[in-house]
């Protein structure tokens, strides 16, 4: 009987300590394992959402957004744009919805950037006028961005592929491999995405969003989804990230010269 009472007292003590631990939620209780997440610094002004059935609308097929300065970020903080190419609308829509849901969830938003990278998203690059490849990452601060992935009319800046930061055109957006998003054209950098790994870069994300066989009528149709993220190193040199921000989805028809 004494042993039973002793076990009851131990169980009661454990419950009391656990309740206190939940109340204070501090490190000593071992529950504070989630890092404080940074705020989402992105504000979208134009978010293209291309669907399966519609023709590409070049008047709206661009991304325009503002990145705001984060007061709780340090000098190691920077904002980046991430892309993924799909050759299947259903898969694109499903993964896109899953990532948006994660970014809105109070717990999953802490790791939404890692989840996005696990899905195969890569950092968007750009080629400058000298055809030098750069990552499109921006230091903590306020920046206005405009991005059009494909060329429709080279004679009109608003319909030309390009990246503008704070009203300055810095180059054209390209994939991790330096290839453009002008799929199906004859330029040196205009290759279609491939189902096989690029021999020069096995981490190329072109393959991760693909199905082996596209649906009838959707051959050489691609969807490109963009997300924004912000991350920095804390005082312990561990990565702290913002929830990812959905920037939109465009449709690229590689069967057409003006896609």
Image (tube, rainbow, N blue to C red):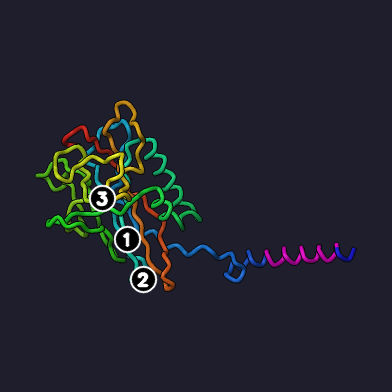
Q: In the rendered view, would you say 103 is above or below 252?
A: below
The C terminus - image quarter = top left
* 87 relative to 231, above or below: above
Q: Mark 3 highlights which residue? A: 200
What label sits on residue 56 in the rendered view? none
Q: Which residue is the extreme one toward the front?
A: 199
* Residue 122 x, y percent position in the rendering: 32, 52
Asked if the residues shown at circle 2 and circle 3 are in contact, with their CB atoms under 8 angstroms apart, the answer is no
Q: Which residue is most to the right?
A: 1
Is 220 on the left or on the right of 88, as rendered? Answer: left
Q: Is residue 202 above or below residue 5?
A: above
Circle 3 Cα neighbour tier, 10 Å, few/some/many (<14 / 14–19 / ≥20) = few
Q: Secondary structure at mark 2?
A: loop
Residue range in magenta is 4-18
**Residue 16, image x, y percentages:** 72, 66
Query: In x, y percent, where is residue 210?
Result: 34, 39
For disc 2, the marked residue is 74
Residue located 30% across and 30% down the image = 218
Badge 1 element:
strand
The outermost residue toward the top is: 216
Q: Which residue is mark 1?
A: 79
**Viewer-proximal residue, 191 or 183?**
191
Per the model, the C-alpha gap separating discs 2 and 1 is: 12 Å
Secondary structure character of the magenta stretch overall: helix
Q: Quadrant of residue 187?
A: top left
- Mark 2 nearby-residue class (10 Å; few <14, some 14–19, many ≥20): some
Q: Nearer the viewer, mark 2 or mark 3?
A: 3
Direction from residue 236 to residue 252 in the image, left or right: left
Q: Quadrant of the N terminus?
A: bottom right
């Amino acid at each position: 009987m004494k042993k039973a009472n002793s076990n009851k007292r131990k169980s009661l003590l454990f419950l009391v300590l656990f309740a206190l631990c939940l109340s204070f939620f501090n490190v000593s209780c071992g529950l504070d394992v989630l890092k404080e997440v940074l705020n989402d610094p992105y504000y979208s002004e134009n978010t293209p959402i291309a669907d399966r059935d519609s023709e590409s609308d070049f008047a709206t097929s661009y991304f325009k957004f503002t990145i705001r300065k984060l007061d709780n970020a340090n000098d190691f903080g920077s904002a980046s744009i991430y892309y993924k190419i799909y050759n299947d609308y259903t898969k694109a829509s499903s993964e896109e919805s899953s990532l948006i849901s994660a970014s809105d969830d109070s717990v999953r938003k802490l790791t939404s950037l890692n989840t996005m990278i696990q899905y195969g998203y890569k950092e968007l690059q750009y080629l400058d006028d000298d055809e030098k490849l750069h990552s499109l990452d921006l230091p903590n601060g306020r920046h206005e961005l405009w991005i059009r992935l494909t060329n429709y009319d080279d004679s009109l800046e608003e319909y030309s592929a390009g990246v503008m930061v704070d009203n300055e055109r810095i180059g054209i957006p390209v994939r991790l491999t330096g290839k453009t998003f002008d799929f199906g054209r004859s330029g040196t950098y205009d290759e279609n995405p491939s189902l096989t790994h690029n021999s020069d870069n096995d981490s190329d994300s072109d393959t991760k969003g693909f199905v082996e066989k596209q649906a009838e009528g959707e051959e050489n149709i691609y969807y490109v989804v963009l997300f924004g993220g912000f991350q920095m190193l804390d005082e312990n040199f561990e990565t702290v990230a913002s929830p990812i921000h959905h920037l939109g989805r465009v449709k690229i028809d590689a069967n057409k010269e003006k896609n």
